[in-house]
Amino acid sequence: MNKRSILVFRFSAMGDVAMISPVIEQLCEQHPQVSIILVSRPFFKPFFDTNPQIRFHPIYPKEQHRGLRGLYRLFKELRNYKIDAIADLHDSLRSRILSTFFRLTTIPIKRIDKGRAEKRALTRIQNKHLIPLKSTFERYAEVFQSLGFSIRLTNKLVKKTRPLPAAFLRQFNSSSALRRIGIAPFAQHRYKVYPLDKMEEVIAVLSRNHELFIFGGGETEQEMATKWEKKYAHVTNVIGVVDLTHELDLIANLDLMLSMDSSGMHMASLVGTRVISVWGPTHPYAGFLGFGQKEDDCLQFHHPARPSSIYGNKPCLCDGIPCIERISPEQIVTKIEKTLSYG
């Protein structure tokens, strides 16, 4: 059996990088002779740590790999690997420059088709084509297929067994009958964030009968999560408490996750935890629904102007009231309670 090595580029964003993992996992299962050299930001390494066929190579775009000279330095680092093919899953300026360096060799290079024209048709105001587009997972898989590696994607959520972090043992006391729910109420783009005052209403109700864990990003989010932790019983802030590996460990031990259309949904998918997701100007039809997650678990207000954005960096154009604000806290709580009760 001939060993084959594939160099893979995907530098950001967090959710997009997380979405690579289930595709590569199935590629490796179906091709045990394949090894992957994955180039991404060092923070994302935990998404791939459990797969022995993946070797992670960090890119430092603001430091030693900055600019054209830095990318050439990265090229020289990567050239040390025995590479048989290159899969550009990013199609950014950086990845194209790296590909240009490698074109001086005979290594085949294929890049993702992001379907930009289809996505413009999905989000335009006039003559909107509201149809499901290829998922990002399918687009990733197509790159490997174009390099000669067949791959059959099974879009199925598989629960992973991971150790419970010691920091949260108290909340998982076996004598407690409470169900454990993760909540990821934040997102990179503000238009994808459910109003935090309404999210607090959700937390206030759910915390009466469930153990809640708040996930998120930076200092501002951490301050908000800490405030909720102090105000409500059975609420625990996770932000800044443990690293990304232990966040994944914790999510794997939860009964359910509540997330925006954000990386929280994709992190839950990696470890096989079901997600109730809240959508605003974006839409599952754009291809970013979490791997193995169900469209029935997407809470969204249907309006002829939706979606108005693919990534959530543009506002909702729905008669002056953002669609995400038309989803009531009661709807979210009811959906979660029904899911926990009936599955």
Image: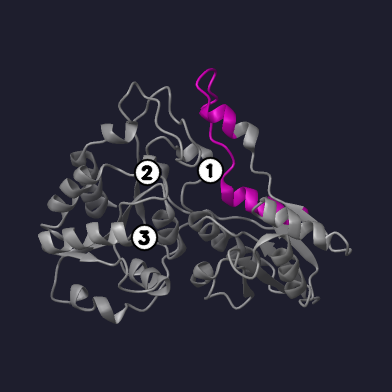
| Above-or-below relation of 16 to 278 | below
Q: Position of residue 191 (x, y in %)?
A: 38, 39
Q: Secondary structure at mark 1?
A: loop
Residue 219: tell me if it is visible.
Answer: yes
In space, the residues marked 2 and 3 are separated at their CA atoms by: 13 Å
Contact check, label 2 and label 3, Cβ < 8 Å: no
Labelled disc at residue 190? 2
Report the magenta residues as a range.
119-148
> Which residue is drawn at the image coordinates 36% and 79% (left, top)?
163
Can residue 148 be seen by looking at this rendering? no
In depth, the one of 342 and 131 nearer the eye is: 131
Q: CA distance from mark 1 to mark 3?
A: 24 Å
Quadrant of the frame with the N terminus: bottom right
Residue for point 60% across, 78% down: 52
Is 224 on the left-hand or right-hand side of 11? left
Q: Which mark is residue 35?
A: none
Which mark, residue 287? Answer: 1
Colouring mode (rainbow / by chain / secondary structure / one colour): one colour
Residue occupying image coordinates x 45% and y 63%: 158
Horizontal side of 136 relative to 198 (left or right) equals: right
Residue designated by label 3: 217
| Residue 135 figure quarter | top right
Q: Is residue 338 magenta?
A: no
x and y percent of residue 312 in the render?
45, 40
Q: Earlier in the sequence, mark 1 or mark 3?
A: 3
